[in-house]
Image (tube, grey):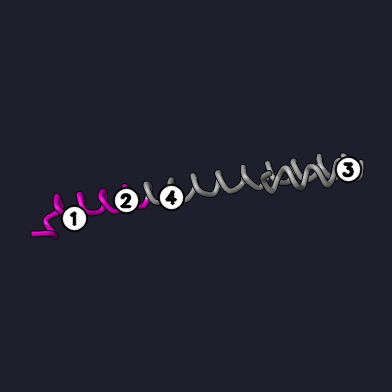
């Protein structure tokens, strides 16, 4: 049995389905927030890389990097 099966079994045994629904909603919302933050972090890194390369390009073509 997994941890989630144990939790679901305990909640269903007590007959408290509202708490089970709230737990599942909170778990899904937290997982979604984690995925969004991970994607936002990756996006920020890609943008930073782009800006760094653009600055490097500008330095090369303005004559400062020679």
Task: Verify whether residue 35 appears in magenta.
Answer: no
Which element type, helix, strand or loop, lies under badge 3?
helix
Residues at discs 4 and 3 in contact (Cβ within 8 Å): no
Q: CA distance from mark 4 to mark 3?
A: 46 Å
Which element type, helix, strand or loop, lies under badge 2?
helix
Q: CA distance from mark 1 to mark 3?
A: 68 Å
Judging by the rendered image, the residue that carries numbered circle 3 is 13
Mark 1 nearby-residue class (10 Å; few <14, some 14–19, many ≥20): few
Judging by the rendered image, the residue that carries numbered circle 2 is 49
Q: CA distance from mark 1 to mark 2?
A: 15 Å
Quadrant position of the N terminus in the picture: top right
Q: Earlier in the sequence, mark 1 or mark 3?
A: 3
Most extreme residue toward the right is 15
Residue interval drawn in magenta = 48-66
Residues at discs 1 and 4 in contact (Cβ within 8 Å): no
Judging by the rendered image, the residue that carries numbered circle 4 is 44
Indicate left or right for 22 with 28 as reference.
right
Indicate left or right for 2 with 62 as reference.
right
């Amino acid at each position: 049995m997994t941890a989630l099966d144990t939790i679901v079994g305990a909640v269903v045994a007590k007959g408290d389905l509202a708490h089970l629904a709230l737990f599942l909603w909170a778990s899904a919302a937290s997982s979604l927030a984690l995925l969004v933050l991970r994607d936002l972090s990756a996006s920020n890194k890609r943008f930073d890389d782009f800006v760094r390369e653009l600055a490097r390009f500008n330095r090369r073509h303005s004559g400062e990097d020679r």
